[in-house]
Image: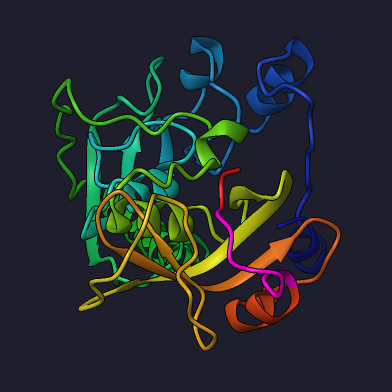
Amino acid sequence: MKVAAAELGLPCLQPKSINSPECVEVLRSLALDLLITVAFGQLLRPVVLKLPRLGCINVHASLLPKYRGAAPIHWAIINGERETGVTTFLMDEGMDTGPILLQRRTEIGPEETAGELEERLARMGAELAVETVEKLWRGEIEPKPQPPDGPLAPKLHREDGRIRWEWEAWRIHNLVRGLSPKPGAFSTWQGELVKILRTKVVEGETKAGPPGCVLPRRDKLLVATGKGLIEILELQPAGCRCISGRDFLNGYCRQGFGSFGE
């Protein structure tokens, strides 16, 4: 944004707090018609919300009221949602609770990662923002109050990425792709941290073992879960580069098969 603003000769402000008295005075001097936020980590206080003539708009990467909060893309995938989208809404004092303006829907692919979905939603959100501004300017949008309830999307913490191998295979797979490429799902191998980067749910395999146990196969890194099997396609042992599951078998399992999570 800053590079684009410089190329277009537009002023670029980077205040530590948009609610600071100094920033508020600058915004007030601009006689704003509209203010738009995207991926902005600060709540706007009433003094800022009241400045623009047409209000303050946010572009949010979910179908509100579902997944209000800081990590809507990650949690939608982690929870196994098959559909998501982008929403524009008029901001109020709450967290993503203002009246809805426009929404656009899209399916989530069964193997799609958070990073891949974020790229698609970014393009959709940009298009929807332009459409919202044009229609709002022409008075063609009737804001709709949000229903009060919906699953939340709180900020992710490190422990949210720990794989519980007693979970069923699909739940683990959704966690891995929902946290890819960052912050990343993880487990341990012989006490050392291992990031699990890409997985696949295995259909039709019957031989298994305790959750986290690596199956005795030399061509695939298959791991037993609480229900079903997962193939680990890519992972990153501590202090190493990203490697394939097969390379992990050859390099880390030569002395016998072990278990993740130990």
Horizontal side of residue 31 vs 65, given as left or right: right
Would you say the magenta stretch is mainly helix, strand or loop? loop
What's the residue at 54%, 11% (across, down)? 47
Q: Position of residue 85 (x, y in %)?
A: 29, 56
Tell me the magenta residue range.
252-259
Q: Quadrant of the N terminus?
A: bottom right
Horizontal side of residue 199 vs 90, given as left or right: right
Relative to 90, residue 244 above or below:
below
Relative to 248, residue 224 above or below:
above
**Quadrant hosting residue 252:** bottom right
Q: Give the residue at the far front of this rendering.
A: 256
Magenta span contains residue 108: no
Horizontal side of residue 253 vs 238, given as left or right: left
Magenta span contains residue 257: yes
Q: Position of residue 101 (x, y in %)?
A: 24, 43
**Quadrant hosting residue 157:** top right
Relative to 88, residue 105 above or below:
below
What's the residue at 44%, 48% (across, down)? 74
Q: Quadrant of the C terminus?
A: top right
Residue 91 can be seen, yes or no: yes
**Quadrant hosting residue 237:** bottom right
What's the residue at 25%, 31% (across, down)? 151
Q: Position of residue 90 (x, y in %)?
A: 33, 32
Nearer the observer, 189 or 118: 189
